[in-house]
C-alpha cells in the first residue's frame, strides 16, 4: 500500500515519545534521499488524540504511531490496509483528500528480522512467543506469512493470547510454564518488556534447546541482557533494533514510494548511541 501524495511532514504519535529513536534515523534517511520533509516526535495524551488527528489532516501530515495509540488510530482511521485490519493496529498513517489512511509496517519489521535470523525459514520450526500484548498480533501474522504452523505462546494472561490468535486467524497452543513452552522450539521470541530496564531475562538461555534462535523485540543501547546471554551461549540472537529500523524503512516506502537507505538509518542510530 502506498500514499497517493507525499505527506507535508512526518510525526511519531506516542505518550511518552521523547525517547523514540524514529526521528533520528528517519531524518537521516529523509536528508539522504533529498526530501525536505522533517520527522518529529509528538507527545499526545490519549484524550487529545482525536483532536490532534483532525489537525494533522488539515496539514496533510503523515507519520508513525507508537504506544499507547496503535489501536486507537486503527479505530479512528477512515481506511486501512488489509494488513492493518488483520493485525488490528496502525503504526503508519497518511492522509488522502483529508481522509486518514492507516497501515501496519510492524509485520514487515518482524519479517525482515526473522528472515535475517533464520535464512532457511521457519516453516518446519516450532516457534514460541513469550508475551501476548499489543505486539503479539503482528508476530502471529509474520509467523503465519512465513508458513510456521506450530506456534506456542507463554502468556501470563492466557485469555489475551487466545483472543489475539482468534482475531488474526492463527492456531496457537498456550502454556502456563515457560520452560515447557520452549521445549523443542527452534525459534523463541520475547514480546514482554522483561530486560528493558534491568538485567532480567524472560528465560535463561541455558534452558533453551541448543539449536534455538532468539529474537527479543526489546532493544536498548548495546543490546538486551537476553540477547547478550544467548550469544554468549553460542545461540543466534538479535534484539528489536532491526525490527524498529525495518518497520521505519517500510513506512518510508509507503509515504514516498522511494527506497530509503537502511545503511544511513543504522549509521544514524550508531552515531546517536555514542553521543
Ligand atoms: P504490551 O502490550 O504491554 O504486552 C506485554 C506482554 O508482556 C503482555 O502479554 C504482558 O502480560 C506480558 N508481561 C509484562 N510483564 C511481564 C512479566 N514480568 N512477566 C511475564 N509477562 C509479562 O507490550 P507490547 O506492545 O506487546 O511490547 C512488548 C515489548 O516489545 C516491549 O518491551 C516493547 O518495547 C517491545 N516492542 C518493540 C518493537 C520494536 O520495533 N522493536 C515494537 C513494539 C514493541 P499481561 O497481559 O499479563 O500484562
Image (cartoon, rainbow, N blue to C red):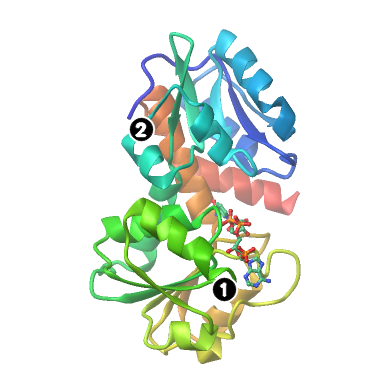
> Residue 98, how many percent across, how many down?
48, 10
Q: Residue at x 67, y 20 (%)?
A: 52
* Residue nearer the viewer, 227 or 182: 182
- How many numbered circles does the render carry? 2
> Residue 110, how many percent across, how many down?
42, 55
Q: Residue at x 72, y 53 (%)?
A: 274
Q: Is residue 117 above or below residue 269?
A: below
Q: Are marks 1 and 2 in contact (CB under 8 Å)?
A: no
User: Quick check: is the Cβ at mark 1 less than 8 Å away from ligand 1?
Assistant: no
Q: Secondary structure at mark 2?
A: loop
Q: Earlier in the sequence, mark 1 or mark 2?
A: 2
Looking at the rendering, which quadrant does residue 191 occupy?
bottom right
* Residue nearer the viewer, 11 or 269: 11
Residue bearing mark 1:
227
Q: Is residue 275 above or below residue 24?
A: below
Q: Residue at x 51, y 41 (%)?
A: 264
Q: Residues within 10 Å of mark 2 (few under 14, many from 20)?
A: some
Q: Secondary structure at mark 1?
A: helix
* Residue nearer the viewer, 109 or 150: 150
Looking at the rendering, which quadrant does residue 36 occupy?
top right
Q: Residue at x 45, y 58 (%)?
A: 163
Q: Is residue 58 above or below residue 15?
A: above
* Residue nearer the viewer, 199 or 185: 185
> Residue 1, how many percent across, how many down?
32, 30
> Residue 16, how many percent across, how many down?
74, 41
Q: CA distance from mark 1 to mark 2?
A: 33 Å
Looking at the rendering, which quadrant does residue 14 occupy?
top right
Check residue 81 in the rendering and tell me which mark sits there, or answer none: 2
Whether residue 44 appears in this view of the structure is: no
Whether residue 96 appears in this view of the structure is: yes
Amino acid at each position: 500500500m502506498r500514499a497517493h501524495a507525499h505527506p507535508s511532514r512526518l510525526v511519531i504519535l506516542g505518550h511518552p515519545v521523547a525517547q523514540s529513536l524514529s526521528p533520528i534515523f528517519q531524518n537521516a534517511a529523509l536528508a539522504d534521499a533529498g526530501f525536505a520533509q522533517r520527522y518529529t516526535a509528538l507527545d499526545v495524551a490519549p484524550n487529545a488524540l482525536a483532536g490532534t488527528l483532525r489537525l494533522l489532516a488539515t496539514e496533510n501530515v503523515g507519520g508513525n504511531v507508537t504506544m499507547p495509540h496503535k489501536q486507537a488510530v486503527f479505530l479512528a482511521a477512515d481506511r486501512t490496509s488489509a494488513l492493518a485490519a488483520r493485525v488490528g493496529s496502525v503504526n503508519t498513517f497518511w492522509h488522502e483528500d483529508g481522509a486518514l489512511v492507516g497501515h501496519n509496517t510492524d509485520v514487515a519489521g518482524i519479517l525482515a528480522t526473522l528472515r535475517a535470523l533464520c535464512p532457511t525459514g521457519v516453516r518446519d520450526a516450532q516457534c514460541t512467543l513469550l508475551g501476548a500484548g499489543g505486539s503479539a498480533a503482528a508476530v502471529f501474522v509474520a509467523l503465519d506469512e512465513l508458513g510456521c504452523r506450530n506456534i506456542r505462546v507463554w502468556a501470563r494472561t492466557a485469555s489475551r493470547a487466545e483472543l489475539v490468535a482468534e482475531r488474526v486467524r492463527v492456531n496457537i497452543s498456550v502454556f502456563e510454564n515457560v520452560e515447557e513452552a520452549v521445549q523443542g522450539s527452534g525459534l523463541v521470541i520475547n514480546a514482554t518488556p522483561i530486560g528493558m530496564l534491568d538485567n532480567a531475562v524472560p528465560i535463561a538461555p541455558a534452558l533453551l534447546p541448543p539449536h534455538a534462535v532468539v529474537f527479543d523485540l526489546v532493544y536498548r543501547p548495546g543490546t538486551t541482557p537476553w540477547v547478550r546471554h544467548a550469544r554468549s551461549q553460542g545461540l543466534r540472537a538479535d534484539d528489536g533494533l532491526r525490527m524498529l529500523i525495518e518497520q521505519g524503512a517500510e513506512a518510508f516506502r509507503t509515504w514516498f514510494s522511494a527506497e530509503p537507505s537502511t545503511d544511513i538509518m543504522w549509521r544514524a542510530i550508531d552515531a546517536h548511541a555514542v553521543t
